[in-house]
Each structure stands twice: as C-alpha cells, then as structure tokens.
Image: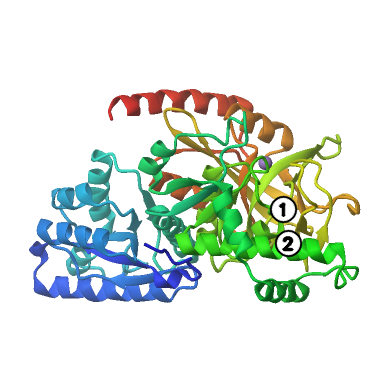
Amino acid sequence: MKMMMKKNLKQLEAWFITGSQHLYGEEVLKQVDRDSKEIAAALDKSAEIPVKVVFKPVLTSPEAIRTICREADNTENCIGLIAWMHTFSPAKMWIAGLKSLSRPFVHLHTQFNRDIPWDSIDMDFMNLNQSAHGGREFGFIGSRMRIDRKVIVGHWSSPPVQSKLGAWLRAACAWHEWQGGKVARFGDNMREVAVTEGNKVSAQIQFGYSVSGYGVGDLAEEVRAVTGAQIDALVDQYRNEYRFPKEATKGSSLLESIREAARIEKGIRNFLEAGGFMAFTTTFEDLHGLVQLPGLAVQRLMADGYGFGAEGDWKTAALVRAMKVMSLGLEGGTSFMEDYTYHLHPGGMKVLGAHMLEICPSISAGKPSLEVHPLGIGGKADPARLVFDVPPGRGINASLMDMGNRFRMVVNPCDVVPADAPLPKLPVARVVWEPYPNLEVAAGAWILAGGAHHTGFSMSLNAGHLEDFSEMAGIEFLLIDKDTTIASVKKELRWNELYYNLKCMNH
Ligand code: MN
C-alpha cells in the first residue's frame, strides 16, 4: 500500500469523547451534549490545534465506550482520543474500551464553566459540573490499568491548555505516521559503528514501522533511468531556489557535477515514491553504481518531509520523519544532525553541528548556496551540497537508542547562537548551539545515557512534544535540561534500569 506523504495535519482527526452516565436524566445529559459540542468546536477552531477535532455523542454505558474505542482504532484518519468527564462517569464502564484501545488518548481535565458562579451556585450547577471528581474516577482506572497517558489540567479555552493539547496531538500524528510506516535502507550500517545498529524486529514491535534493506544497485538503476529533460527541470529549480555558482556554465565540470546530483535526487525520489517510504538511509561505504555520495538529494528530500539517517542509521531516519510530522505548519525547521566539533573556550563552550553533507535546508537562515567540493571520504566524485548557516533561536536535539532491553529517547534543548566569526572555508551547512544547562553537563549526561552522535534537530519543537511521543511509544524518556546535574542523571539512569528490567520480566 502506498502511503501519502503528509503535508497538512488537518486531514487527520482526534475524537472528542465525553464521559457521563444515565443517572442524571435526559435534561442534564442534553446539556452535557451541548457543552461538549461547544468545547469540541472551539478546539477545532483553535490555531493551536493542528488536527480536526470531531465531537462524538456523550458516552453513558460500557457498550457505548467499547464501541467508540473500537471505531477509533478502525478509523484510518483518527489519530487519538481526547477524553473529558463532564460529570461523574463510573470508571468500571471504561475498562473494556480502554483495554482494547490501541490509539493513544489524552485526559483533558477541564470544566465547562471556568468560574464558580459564587452568587448563584446551587445543586443543579453542582450536578452538572462534576469534572473535579469525575476526572479523578476516570484517572484511577487509567492508573489502575497501568496506561501511560497525558493529563492536561485547566480551562479548555486557556491558551496554555490548548497549546499543551496541540503538542500532544502533534506527537499523536507522528505516532500515527509510524504505524505501518516504511523506512528504506540503501546499503547496510557503516561497518563497526555501534549506536546506529539495533534490533529492527524489536523496533517494529515497539514502534510500528518496518525497515527494509535494498542493494544500492537497485537504487543505481532508478538513477540511471532518469532522463536529460528531468535533469534540466531540476537544475532550473536549483537556479531559482539557491545561490547558483556562476562558474557552472554549459559544458563545465561543475555543471556536470550538479546535473549528476540532480539525477541522483530524481532517482532516489522515484524509488521512495514507488515504495511509499517515509524515510531512508544511505551509507558512504556502499555507493556502488552511484557517482557521488547523495548530498544535495538528501537535503532536498528532507526539506520535502522525508526522514533521513546517514551511515545506515534507520532509527534516526524514522525519528527525523516523526519530528517533521510533529512540526508540520510550525515556524522553524527540522533536520538530521550530528554533534560534529566543539568550541571549548572558557568564555562559553558550544557545539558545531553539521554532517558530511546532509543537513536539511528547512533550518537555513537564508538562501542556501549550492556548491561542489571534494569529499575526503568514500572515494567518489565531488558531491554537490547546500551550504548555509542557521538563525539564532531555541533548538532541540533528540536521539533514540536501542539499549538491548528497551529503547531510550534522550532530549536536550539548546540555544542556537551565531558563530563567533564567518566560516568561509567550511563547505557544509552548520549550526552552532549552546546546550542546556551548559556543554559540560549536557555532553556528560548525554554520554552517560549512551546518547547517539546522530540526532533529530528541530527549531519548531520542544521537549514536551518528544516526551508525549515517547509516552505513546512506551519507551524511556530522558530529558537533559536547565535543572539537570550529572548526579541526577546517574540516579535516573539507575532507577530506569531497574524499572525497565522489572517491566521486561512482566512481559
Ligand atoms: Mn554521521
């Protein structure tokens, strides 16, 4: 089945479900229904909410709850449920439904009325507005059933509540993307590299996406099939979108290198589209039949939403795709990234992030420059690439590792800062950042956690998106942030080791 690359999250929906019971009688239930519709409609209109919010009739019986959960699971575009208890909803009614539910749900612990009407409050008001204890009854059963979930507390109209809900929904869209998602791996892993390896069967069970390897010869065949006219069209696009080298005149070897990069781009794109892939990996050790290491091609495909991991890194490729889905429509870009080199000056230590070539131009500060330079590794022809800087702002690095008995997500926010001086001789895209709380603690904690050198880097997302996502995936989430110390991270890692070992024993 061919999957469409998602460009707009409004094609997806979250169902707004409201718990109640029969005890209250017709009148109250009608009111519950009206209130619930109003909240769902307001959320649907909110700029913070990326998906369509669909109101579902109020639930008053175990049968109705079970039915809606099964319908949600069977509705392709439904990414999850927003559950709200307007009144008391005895929670044994929820067991069967929640037990079978595979879509994630968020518990919105809100109340229709924001304020207590101090002058007029009577028992009718009390009967209708019971979220305060209804939400607790619902909460108990989720905890009793050991379901990882998010609870958002506050009035539904408030911007912080809508923003938290929006972040959770974005994570749910990415989670939805992973279910049945496909990653193409051209060639295998870079030889002897550890962190980019992992158990693909465990990943498919835990995450829902599959990783398939392809001989690079299959890709080379697609690349060879690209026509001259298709190459001309792409090179014209490059001229419009980038600073195009003036020396690349007709017949020059520079233009020929760029045309070869265009051929590779079109070939990879055709391959990915035909197979319905959401992400892919390459490795410079396995390029037989390709003239250059794909640089420009990878950069442009990432900019169009594909996930990517270098050196066979399928976990990061899938993660970058998930982060791209989460950030659709938000300001700032998302890219594959690598901690490349350090500035260890006592006045402010920072990281220069880059890769051999493959950084996504969605994070570029301006019009990228299209350049061709030699590559000191891989023994292939000089590859074309986009060179650019990244604007200052908030950023985040996320990394996903296979720890043997579990997957671990490590996340570290940072401030993207300008380079101390221009970098005229550096022929790759680069970004300079100061990690939280500082490089000493951030790098120390990251290394103790086994965090990879490859990351998904984003200037659209924050730690909350990735925490929600990790919770849906049921994996360990380790945040290195302003309050982190090495001592606190060591403790958390030891406790988590115990927790996940006990969890494994119960499965
Ligand atoms: Mn790398």
Q: Which mark is residue 260?
A: 2
Task: Name the residue: 86% across, 69% down.
Answer: 251
Crowding near the residue tagged with mark 2, few <14, some 14–19, many ≥20 C-alpha atoms within 10 Å: many
Q: Which percent across, then down, holds residue 489?
A: 57, 29
Give amino acid for label 2.
Glu
Q: Which mark is residue 168?
A: none
Q: Residue 373: image x %, image y %?
A: 84, 53
Ligand 1 - quadrant of the structure image: top right
> Going 16% across and 56% down the picture, which residue do you hit?
66
Is residue 86 something one can see in this rendering?
no
Q: Return the x and y of residue 436 as percentages of the image width and height.
A: 67, 42
* SS assignment at label 2: helix
Locate the N terminus and report the quarter of the image it occupies: bottom left
Q: Residues within 10 Å of mark 1 (few under 14, many from 20)?
A: some
Residue 365 horizontal side relative to residue 482, left or right: right
Relative to 121, does residue 419 appear above or below in the rendering?
Answer: above
The relative height of residue 53 versus residue 264 in the rendered view (above or below) is below
The residue drawn where x is 86% and y is 50% is: 426
Q: Of 170 and 44, which appears nearest the observer?
A: 170
Label 1 to label 2: alpha-carbon separation: 8 Å
Quarter where residue 256 is shown: bottom right
Dot 1 or dot 2, earlier in sequence: 2
Q: Decide: is 161 above or below 406.
A: below
Task: Write down the residue under mark 1.
Answer: 291
**Of 259 and 303, which appears nearest the observer?**
259
SS at mark 1?
loop
Q: Is mark 2 within 8 Å of ligand 1?
A: no
Q: Taking 127 as reference, is 284 left or right?
A: right
Q: Is residue 63 visible?
A: yes
